[in-house]
Image (cartoon, rainbow, N blue to C red):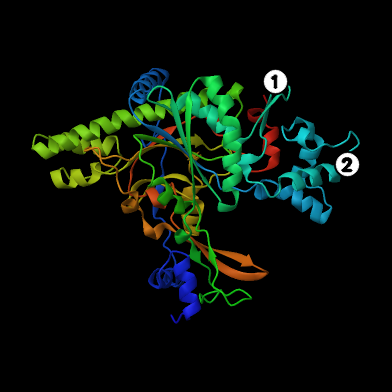
Amino acid sequence: MNFSDSDIKQITNHGLTVQEVEHQIADFIRGFQFAEIIRPATVADGGIQELNYETRKEYIDTYQNYAKTHTVVKFVPASGAATRMLRDLFMFLETDELNDTARKVCEHARMLALYNELNLNANATENDIARAIVNKYGNMPKGLVPFHAYKDGAEVRTPIAEHLVEGAKYAMSNGNTVNIHFTVSPEHHKEFENEINNIIPEYSRRFGIKYNISISEQDPSTDTIAVNPDNTPFRTEESALLFRPAGHGALIKNLNEIDADIIFIKNIDNVCTDTVAHDTIEYKQALAGMLISVQTQIFEYLRELDTGRGDVNEIAEFVKTVLCTDVVPNADELRKILNRPLRVCGMVRNTGAPGGGPFWVKNAGLQIVESSQIAPDARDIMNKSTHFNPVDLVCGVHDYMGNKFNLMDFIDENAGFISDKSYAGRQIRAMERPGLWNGAMAKWNTIFVAVPATTFNPVKTVADLLSPAHND
């Protein structure tokens, strides 16, 4: 590939090398293999575990005692834009055709926490309401949109605020500190900082705790080049190369910078009001307690293997039954399997169309697989799945010696995917890196746990804010 001096300068300024860009183009040409799913992970086959009340209580006690003397961080991917959430309103304004979502929102707009900020009169039309919402929030990050109103509107919370409240209820470290890390788009960094600085004093006072909030941006060096349909580098009207953010999988680099004993991961828009938060708080702590218990056993086995005291048959059985991985009862092989990051992932039962979620994958054990990674001729297997992935993860990133793993060593680089997009009216091909909770964590030890649907309350469209989970 022949790049000009100006191309090389642009590549270098982006934090990339020519060799890395050439490798990306080779990936476009070669493509990515689909995941070889064997069957969905289910409760019936042991791929997904269920926790009864007594077990949950034990795990919660384990976690609460552990958190008193250890560091806990809540990691929140928060780069989502409200533009996507409001797409049905944009479409209505562009076409003047009232789609179902726009109709529902306009009819019940007064139920929305954001309504009072619109300054609409009582005679506002559907067009007036939709335009006011789009004008006010269309260019705003989702994390800053008012989601919930309390006390007859006297208190309004954004998703940022709800994550601060959640953190106070289950993610406290060392007795009185809540550590939360948000990943944001560069253009919204300052807005996030301002919102956080405005609300921290109130929630600090209310819960009697200290907040330690940090923010990072997706590293430009994780971006990928865009290509034409023939896989040659796409060029803008100014003849420049085009680089695009490579999806949430690029955030593994941000996660790798977090050094904590327990890391919770939850998306920015998956929040709910206080009145329905009980299950979320209970299960977050239970998943963390389970991780601590399993991790403690893993560490004990690794120390036994180091001293030659380990019963390899007993350890192999543990790996098979708890980590759902077949392994030869050999000390070296067992050590390779055990000495990896650990994640416990909540899984919600499917109530609608099945999609990506927990699967058994050939030669890879339990994996979270997105629908884009599944071959068309394997869709019948996908459609038999009983659960899906709500991005409800608890992670352990330290080894048994207390050292932090380098998470970049546990990525399946072949788990990315390519999609067709457009830029300035022209067709392009775009590449996403292995997703944060699928390919980027493919080589972690993984446990799937069934969690109730009440813990999963994402806001994908503005109409979702009308559901009971978002109305106090």
Percent from the top left, x then y, of residue 409?
31, 53
CA separation, marks 2 and 1? 27 Å
State whether residue 50 appears in this view.
no
Name the residue beneath numbered marker 2: 125
Percent from the top left, x then y, of residue 184?
54, 47
Percent from the top left, x then y, of residue 370?
48, 50
Residue at the image point whose x is 67% and y is 32% from the top: 467
Name the residue beneath numbered marker 1: 151
Seen in the picture, residue 270 relative to 79 is either above or below; the reply is above
Categorize mark 2 by other alpha carbons within 10 Å: few (<14), some (14-19), many (20+): few
Of mark 2 and mark 1, the one earlier in the sequence is 2
161 and 371: which one is in front? Answer: 161
Residue 136 figure quarter: top right
291 and 37: which one is in front? Answer: 291
Residue at the image point whose x is 60% and y is 40% from the top: 194
155 and 76: which one is in front? Answer: 155
Percent from the top left, x then y, of residue 181?
47, 39
Seen in the picture, residue 258 relative to 155 is either above or below; the reply is below
Seen in the picture, residue 225 relative to 247 is either above or below; the reply is below
Q: Name which residue type carries label 2.
A: Thr
Task: Name the image quarter holding the C terminus.
Answer: top right
Q: Name which residue type carries label 1.
A: Lys
Q: Assign a secondary structure to mark 1.
A: loop
Q: Would you say 8 lies left or right of 139 here?
A: left
Task: Name the image quarter holding the N terminus.
Answer: bottom left
Q: Would you say 466 lies left or right of 175 here?
A: right
